[in-house]
Amino acid sequence: DEMRRPLTVPLTTAAFGFLCDSFLITNRRLRHKYYLKEGSSHNWNHEPFDFSSRIGWDNFYKEGNQSDEQSLEEMEYEWHSNIPHSVIVDAVSPTIDASFKYYATAENDELYLPAILLVGTGNSALPRILHDAFDIPVRVTCLDYSPVCVEMIRSMYSDLCPNMDFVLGDATQLKHAVNGSKYDVIVDKGLLDALMCGEGFDSDLDKLMLGIDEVLTTHEWGVSILICFQLSKSNRKFLVELADRGESRNSTLFWDFDIPVAGSENGRGTFNLARRCAIDEKNRIVNVDNMITDWR
């Protein structure tokens, strides 16, 4: 059985390059340059830093907001701001509906909520938007390895979002970081890009993707969203190979890359989605859309 937290329990707190504008960025300085440009710019003043460095990120959260006003919106910062949050909400809505109906009718002593995990969450507005986006309650977990970030978003959202928890942990050791919990939705919005700014990022990426496979529900509605710079053909092949090597015995992740997003043409971020698909006795992928429809 999958390990999940009931509603009544208090919430706690590859060899890789990538494509941008049809040219391959192989230089680490260019990766940093383009990553820096992809953030929303209001009231955040920061110099380029090593985006694979924990110290660099700590300083970003300490020093980035130079505004005298500390409203919620002034404390939030978006990477890949060309991808609207509404697109993410729409993409995960069928999963939220399907999982909620399953948990509501399952023979459990406790009521479970659909669970969303944001890896490398940063100080984005996305956690609070997902927390309040649906007609049914959901549990949102914000995971980041920067203690400054975790305390920052805890102060921003803990009072506003009762079903939100905040985890200080390493996304490349995901199963350990979340104590073996399972999630119906996992969202990576910029973390993969940050990992790729470091040396030896292929190993970190391998660990991240295998960890996602471990903590994503094995139920057929599970989805993992990846928002990042455009992936090359070799990158996509690598992600598909990692999905095939996953720990799940009777299901796999099926990737859709570069899903069109209206209004995102002026940015370099791309929207990618992996769906949990069941495998039948002949090792064929069962259509996930049909199975999600069955839960409605």
Image: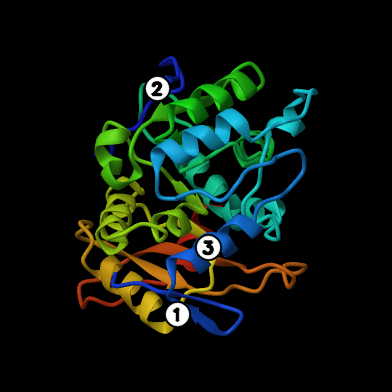
Mark 3–mark 1 Cα distance, whole angstroms, equals: 12 Å
Tell me what residue is drawn at x 28 percent, y 64 percent.
202
Q: Relative to 177, is 155 on the left or the right? A: right
Tell me what residue is drawn at x 29 percent, y 66 percent.
243
**Do tag 3 and tag 1 residues touch (Cβ < 8 Å)?**
no
Q: Please tell me whether mark 3 sits on a helix, a strand or a loop.
A: strand
Q: Which residue is mark 1?
A: 232
Quadrant showing the N terminus: top left
Amino acid type, label 2: Glu
Mark 1, Cα crowd under 10 Å, few <14 / some 14-19 / many 20+, is some
Mark 3, Cα crowd under 10 Å, few <14 / some 14-19 / many 20+, is many
Q: Is residue 68 above or below residue 281?
A: above
Of marks 3 and 2, the one in the foreground: 3
Q: Name the image colouring.
A: rainbow
Q: Which residue is mark 2?
A: 110
Q: Relative to 10, is 279 on the left or the right? A: left
Residue 248 place in picture, x, y as percent: 23, 57
Where is residue 135, by image quadrant? top right
Residue 268 visible to an observer of this rendering: yes
Q: Please tell me whether mark 2 sits on a helix, a strand or a loop.
A: loop
**Do tag 3 and tag 2 residues touch (Cβ < 8 Å)?**
no
Mark 2, Cα crowd under 10 Å, few <14 / some 14-19 / many 20+, is some
Of marks 1 and 2, the one in the foreground: 1
Nearest the camera: 245 or 251? 245
Residue 26 place in picture, x, y as percent: 42, 75
Q: Please tell me whether mark 1 sits on a helix, a strand or a loop.
A: loop
Q: Which residue is mark 3?
A: 228
